Image: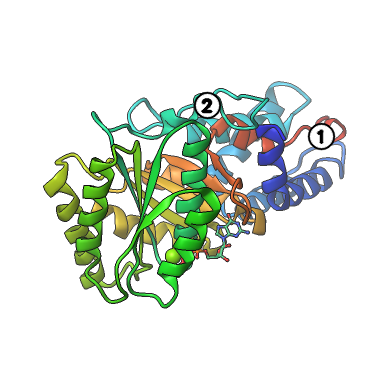
Amino acid sequence: MGLFQKFRDGLRKTQEKLTTEIKRIVTRGPKLDAESLEELEATLISTDIGVDTAVKIVELTKEAAKQSGQVDVFAIARAEIERELSFGESGSSPTVATDTKSGHAAAWPSVLVKAPQPPTVILLAGVNGTGKTTSTAKLAHLLKEQGNTVLLAACDTFRAAAIEQLKIWGQRVGCEVIAGQYGADSAAIAYDAMEAAINRKVDYLIIDTAGRLHTKKNLMEEMKKMHRSLQKKAPTAPHEVLLVLDSTTGTNALNQARTFHQALGVTGLIVTKLDGTAKGGIVVAIARELKIPVKFIGLGEQVDDLQPFDPKQFAEALFAESPETRRM
Ligand SMILES: Nc1nc2c(ncn2[C@@H]2O[C@H](COP(=O)(O)OP(=O)(O)OP(=O)(O)O)[C@@H](O)[C@H]2O)c(=O)[nH]1
Ligand SMILES: [Mg+2]
């Protein structure tokens, strides 16, 4: 399946909501009146896209309507969303070339920072149940598909069965897992895993961590301790701190991101469970508010359901072409 098709399938709930509603609004009468514009704004907001973005799209629609009688709301929304997701050079979400054969983006590892010398260390963080462990495995799978060697570290020593869960995923994706005992110091396991990754000369070390409340200071301290522990072996590690956010939690995800970013210096986001929500617009709100690049999105529970993020494909998938709704 091509990359675009994966985006479309995964984002179908949000896309259907937007398409159905906007179609109803723009085809209702000969003109886009104030009431229709208000409804358009409310529809956009209902996908958690953020008030500012919704207002901007409505403004652009109004302007376009003034200039010519016809307005293509879908094209306006697509362009604006792509623009907002592709902010600036530094920390930007790069547009990823598509490799239609493999179904993945051809140049996708460019979304990840690479260590000056291997291993590149990627640490996944986030509150309970956002998808850290499954994303760890999915990311390992993506990296292995590109010919890299990957080692996993089970640094969630807190939740019952967390270590077994990662080991099962490790078997599935063909990666060894460095683990300790439940209740062990996660920083010590991170250190051991780092040592193993260096000795074995692997390309990537991916670290799964325990879910933590973003409001709990001691848990944040534990994450910082893990950082220090990795840095004893490689001063530049971790090279990526990816915050995993559950898209179904809406604006809560924004608050989590702010606190984690303050404490840990998040380098990128993984937004999961977009397949299960009609509020996929949250990706836009997050990017606009936080200026942290979305690096991957989770579009399902299977091992190949993590996709490198691409602003253009995302915007096009949300406002998939639907010619009969475009004229008015
Ligand atoms: N539909 C869907 N489900 C997902 C996605 N990502 C994760 N999940 C599911 O979410 C649930 C929690 O995933 P985990 O990876 O265990 O989450 P976690 O953050 O490691 O959880 P804790 O370790 O308890 O903090 C699992 O049932 C996953 O299958 C996604 O993109 N789409
Ligand atoms: Mg977990």
Q: In this rendering, would 265 be left or right of 144?
A: left
* x, y percent for residue 160: 42, 78
Q: How is the image coloured?
A: rainbow
Binning the other alpha carbons within 10 Å of mark 1 as few (below 14), some (14 to 19) or many (20 upward) gives: few
Relative height, residue 175 to residue 293 (above, below) = below
The verdict on label 2 being within 8 Å of ligand 1 is: no
Q: Residue furthest front?
A: 200
Percent of width and height locating residue 152: 38, 52
The image quadrant of residue 46 is bottom right
Tell me: residue 315, above or below residue 174: above
> Where is residue 108 shown, x and y percent of the image?
49, 30
Residue 93 visible (yes or no): no
Residue 29: mark in rendering: none
Q: Is residue 82 visible?
A: yes
Residue denoted by label 1 = 322
Crowding at label 2, few (<14), some or many (≥20) Cα neighbours within 10 Å? Answer: many
Task: From the viewer's side, name the closer residue of 169 and 223.
Answer: 169
Q: Position of residue 75 (x, y in %)?
A: 69, 29
Q: Quadrant of the N terminus?
A: top right
Residue 158 image-quadrant placement = bottom left
Q: Residue at x 33, y 33 (%)?
A: 113
Residue at image location 12% in from the left, 48% down from the top: 232
**Residue 186 placement, left or right of 86:** left
The kind of residue tagged 1 is Ser
Q: Which residue is mark 2?
A: 96
